[in-house]
Amino acid sequence: MKEIGIGILGFGTVGAGVVEGLQRHAELLQERTGLTLRLRGVADLDVTTDRGVTIDPALLTTNAQALIEDPEISILVELIGGTGVARTLTLAALAAGKSVVTANKALLAEHGAELYEAAAKHQTELLFEASVGGGIPIIRALREGLSGNRIERITGILNGTCNYILTRMEREGLRFADVLAEAQAAGYAEAEPSLDIDGIDTAHKAVVLAAHAFGAPVQMADVAVRGIRDMDAMDITYAAGLGYRIKLLAVIRQTDGELDVGVYPALVPHGHLLADVSHAFNAVLVTGDLVGDTIYYGQGAGRFPTASAVIGDIVDAARNQASGQPQRLTVFAPAKQPMPLRAATEVMTRYYLRLSLIDQPGMFGRVAQILGRHGISIASLMQKEARTDDFVPVIILTHTAKEGAFVDALQEVDALDQIGAPTVRYRIEDFT
Amino acid sequence: MKEIGIGILGFGTVGAGVVEGLQRHAELLQERTGLTLRLRGVADLDVTTDRGVTIDPALLTTNAQALIEDPEISILVELIGGTGVARTLTLAALAAGKSVVTANKALLAEHGAELYEAAAKHQTELLFEASVGGGIPIIRALREGLSGNRIERITGILNGTCNYILTRMEREGLRFADVLAEAQAAGYAEAEPSLDIDGIDTAHKAVVLAAHAFGAPVQMADVAVRGIRDMDAMDITYAAGLGYRIKLLAVIRQTDGELDVGVYPALVPHGHLLADVSHAFNAVLVTGDLVGDTIYYGQGAGRFPTASAVIGDIVDAARNQASGQPQRLTVFAPAKQPMPLRAATEVMTRYYLRLSLIDQPGMFGRVAQILGRHGISIASLMQKEARTDDFVPVIILTHTAKEGAFVDALQEVDALDQIGAPTVRYRIEDFT
């Protein structure tokens, strides 16, 4: 049976999961592929810590370059993370003509163009199913299953940590800081959580999705990113009362030939399947012009779910190599005329607004006047009881208007003497 | 640019959708594949009816065999349906070395082994993404994205007609016959609806999924099939009151190395994502040993969703042909030791039971005694008010027991003088 040699760069949580998966399913993978997938080396700076998986010590090395140069190894799996060493080694592996499998969304988001070009130049393959949505085969769905569609919109819950925090805040009425601290203590959130809670990780994934679904060379700087760090439990409660759940979304959408890519917490209506994605699960709603709405759901992170995606890519790379076609899919197929990006201020959206009024009588009329002057009309309005700080929360759900109109209007509103604190706002996603 | 010739057999709803999709996205598909996908002929017995798509009349023919023999055509798309002519032409196309794309679940379920063998023998490809779940790329997920997993269970809502009927029965309190009649009038259900409402269509799809997820040569005769024809709105209402929604499910599950494949309406708990799949949508929950639970959701039928899957397969076949590898994926990879089927009576399950008691006092003790003697214990129990026919409905949710125990116990129960009508039973799926 033909043998394909595999080297793994990075022996952390996912690396150990891949090693265990390859061991556990050695026979199954042979049956499915007609090939022997042989692990020939695992490189890490630390080769002594127990990773919870049995491995022949002779396979462990601190010399990643040696694996890249090993002629018996034709597939390199990059699980180092970050954009430093990972980039150098990925480029070296591609230059050596190896197929590379990576789970590294930051690397793809920040250096994708360079990597895609290197893979094309050296006529080899770069696979990255694990970079978005953990074990969910969303990249494959976009590049293959839905290849007959013009993609219209992608809306994803792509960060398990944020979704876990929001789920617990809503269900248990907890404060953001408390859930975060607990999640950190339990190992569900990083000690330095900003990549997750500030939306950066979600934005990395949005850039990867935008590239492969729209053929769009979107940069991180093109993405309007807002995280959940400042989320007040009050807004989650008010939103729930109005029939919405707040989710951190990545939204990639084309409107009239323009693309906008954003990451922000938004109100999703109860009853929509995305509203029911709880805890650390991820889900991606992909709308294609032929297929309509499709949803892909699963665990977005973790040792074995991520290993599942990595092994799926290894299998694909092995099949392609065995068939003498390591470039069956174009690594990145840019659209002939990449869609221009829509200016952030031109994006049409609805908003949930929470105003903090100090003084009540006659006051609301002035706010409504300002909104109206900016073309923003009110869909519904609730005045809540004053809280201890004596602000009267007034909740407004608006109709659709331009983002820029909201920015301008709220600047005026917040400058009013009778506004006690900056107006809190969240987009509403109606999926219409 | 390299050109790949395509012939379509069957110019019905889906065929016209494929023609339109190929026309609409000619340029996009070129960008994505680097190939020109050229439609070279469409065969149908009826080439005069307007299909709502503009097509060069010279492409239309009544001679399917001519398309199969056309040396310029390397991909044949079988959209005839049924297992007669479709089988003959599919075998002829494979024998001619053509790649075949089919949406025909009945053909695969009933003649899969013969077709897989023919494709292997003639070293060509048989693709069938559209056969299950319409536009949802579920076949690709199983054969490629999740190839690193041992699949543990698949639970699918696979028939849009049934799901549409059940959704309307629940939401509007309607009777089965009324919704069916209305759906038929509106074209959502076939004039002869038995393939759908008796679960046969769902069973066809279950056989296809079982084959490719478990490498199991399951036959239609191996599938325990129950449809929704006898569904009483009363049970939908009672189930809703208990926190469940009734869905027609395909369940393919391995337990202790044995496989069971069944199609039946079952109670799915509120809050589970499958419970929220409404109207004509389909969804498939796939549980893998590494990835855990994943869900795939979308439109399970219809002109464009099905065309989306067909075109995705055409693209794959074209890519594989262009790379000189028309057999990148084994058409069917049977497990080396196919899992034995679990005897239907040995399957462990929970049940919702609705007893029709004529006489009340002391009566229930006798039922409980019979259940207990068969090892069935009661999880919860409700007695409802008598209906006009004077039966007292008693609802029992059981704990888990063997299917055979339920069959035996209910035979005894229903033989009691005080039971006015056969006990109604539905499985409960807890996804544990």
Image (cartoon, coloured by chain):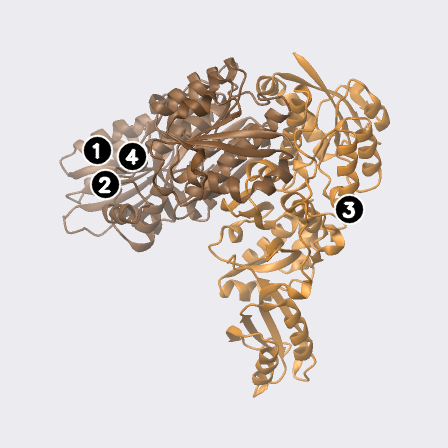
Chain colours: A brown, B orange
Q: Amino acid at mark 3?
A: Glu
Q: Which residue is nearer to you in this view: B228 or B77?
A: B77
Q: Is residue B232 left or right of residue B245?
A: right
Q: Is residue A266 above or below residue B311?
A: below
Which residue has dot 1 on it?
A413
Q: Along the polypeptide, which appears first: circle 4 or circle 2?
A: 4
**Residue depicted at x 52% and y 60%:** B430
Q: Amino acid at mark 1?
A: Val
Chain name for mark 1: A
**Label 2 residue SS:** strand
Chain name for mark 2: A
**Residue A141 visible, this orientation:** no
Evaluate whether label 4 is on the same chain as label 2.
yes
Q: Which residue is nearer to you in this view: A125 or A9?
A: A9
Evaluate whether label 4 is on the same chain as label 3.
no
Disc 2 and disc 1: Cα gap in Å? 9 Å
Chain name for mark 3: B
**Label 3 residue SS:** helix
Q: Which residue is nearer to you in this view: B373 or A399?
A: B373
Q: Which mark is residue A198?
A: 4
Q: Nearer the viewer, mark 1 or mark 3?
A: 3
Q: Which mark is residue A355?
A: 2
Q: Amino acid at mark 4?
A: Asp
Q: Nearer the viewer, mark 1 or mark 4?
A: 4
Residue A226 horizontal/vertical position (percent): 30, 33
Q: Is residue A363 left or right of residue A301?
A: left
